[in-house]
Amino acid sequence: MDYDKMMVELRALAVLAGRKIMEIYESDDFDVRAKSDDSPVTAADEAADAIIAQGLRAAFPDAAIVTEEQAATHAETARDFFIVDPLDGTKEFVQRRGDFTVNIAWVEGGVPVRGVVYAPARGRMFLTDAAGVSREETGPFDPDRMGATTPITVRTPDESALLVVASKSHRDAATDAYIAKYAVADSRAAGSSLKFCLVATGEADLYPRLGRTMEWDTAAGDAVLRGAGGHVVRFDDHAPLRYGKPGFENPFFIAHAPGVTLQEG
């Protein structure tokens, strides 16, 4: 695979999808419907999905593509594939809280090796470069030209004063009980795949998720965190999180910087 071409295309599609999402987000009103699993979906989810899926098919006609909004068609997939969540954090979008992201990743042999996470309302973009090293772009987010970027890396954690990030919309008592096993200096809430990116930039050390997620929710953030030196592991046995699973459902997981001694659940 030509990673240089890939990252140019993934970044451009994320920007274009983000523009469409913001057009709808900034409108006076938009419809919200419930999918079969009772999760919300909006016109922004569907429009962004169409932009990304069509762009990927045009640029990479031989590649397998999995997207959240077309998930019912994905009975099985190839060993290597693109996986897309066009609007992660739909609840944040609906409540106009800003913590939503566009997510596109490339998975090879069960591992997300390249990816982009774009938070258009926050003006932040995190992406791997062609070599798989993670960077943050600071704008102006032109689809045809990358702006200035800086490398990002996880921080060396202080285990007596850890920085923890957890879900804004899905935090529960089990998550709080697990976080209480650590010496925490600060705990913050964030929506969508931004939580992976906060660990990747050193703004947090630990992100535990004790709730249902799908591979499209996590793959791009996982790729960014891996490219910044971090890890995403299963909650039960601390083995690396794998992709291409039947049904695309994830187990509970922990995203963390190296140096965090993981506690048992």
Image (cartoon, grey):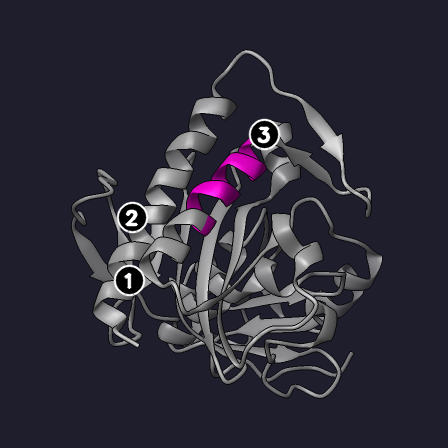
Residue at the image position 83 percent from the left and 57 percent from the top: 173
Spatial CA span between label 3 and label 2: 20 Å
Q: Residues within 10 Å of mark 3 (few under 14, many from 20)?
A: some
Q: Which residue is mark 2?
A: 12
Q: Residue at x 51, y 44 (%)?
A: 49
Question: With 149 as the anchor, is 34 left or right in this view?
Answer: right
Q: How many marks?
A: 3
Identify whether 4 is placed above or below 37. below
**Residue hosting label 3:** 43
Closer to the chain start, of discs 3 and 2, is 2
> Which residue is more in the foreground, 207 or 112?
112
Overall secondary structure of the magenta stretch? helix
Pick the front one: 228 or 72 = 72
Question: What's the distance in space between the residues labelled 1 and 3, CA to CA?
Answer: 26 Å
Marks 1 and 2 sit apart, C-alpha to C-alpha, by 8 Å
- SS under mark 3: helix
Nearer-N-terminus badge (1/3): 1
Can you tell which quarter of the image residue 166 is in? bottom right
Query: What crowding class fits label 2: few (fewer than 14 Cα within 10 Å), some (14-19), or many (20 or more)?
Result: many
Q: Give the magenta range.
A: 43-53
